[in-house]
Amino acid sequence: MKVNELVAQWQSNASEVRTDETYEIRLPLYDAAKIAALCDLFPGLTRERILTDLLAAALDELTSSFSYQPGDEIAAYDEEGDPMYADAGLTPRFQALAKAYAEQLKKQHADG
């Protein structure tokens, strides 16, 4: 999700499964004021939901900014028959770590 898609999502008030894990943060004063203003603009949303969605959007944008670094492994061939090399940059490593942590959190949630 991109940051510019948040308002549309908030207006539709969509929801998804949340982890039991909690995170405590201390915001700079003006950032806290902006969160309070968003709570006023979208009274159906909690402060936690706004912070969660903003963080998710920022993480999506951050990971999409990871640059592609061609590795040695050929992942596919393009329509010209030229090799396309697998990404050896941060993206595949991040995705593997995120998947492993997601499985761990799902297991903790199921074990209850």
Image (spheres, rainbow, N blue to C red):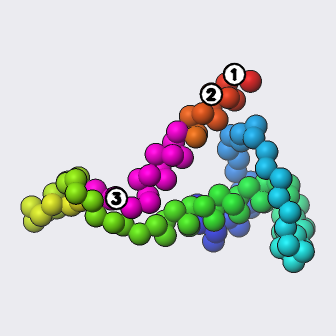
| Mark 1 neighbour class, 10 Å CA radius: few under 14, some 14 to 19, many 20 or more | few
Q: Main secondary structure of the magenta part?
A: helix
Q: Quadrant of residue 91?
A: bottom left
Image location of residue 92, percent across then percent down: 41, 53
**Mark 2 residue type:** Lys
**Mark 1 residue type:** Asp
The reply, left or right, for residue 73 in relation to residue 33 is left
Q: Which residue is mark 3?
A: 88
**What whole-number distance in Å separates the C-alpha atoms at marks 2 and 3?**
29 Å
Q: Secondary structure at mark 3?
A: loop
Q: Which residue is mark 2?
A: 107
Segment colored magenta: 86-100
- Mark 2 vs mark 3, foreground winner is 3
Query: In terms of depth relative to the viewer, which is nearer, 90 or 43?
Result: 90
* Residue farthest to the front, as pictured: 72
Image location of residue 60, percent across then percent down: 56, 61
Residue 32 magenta = no
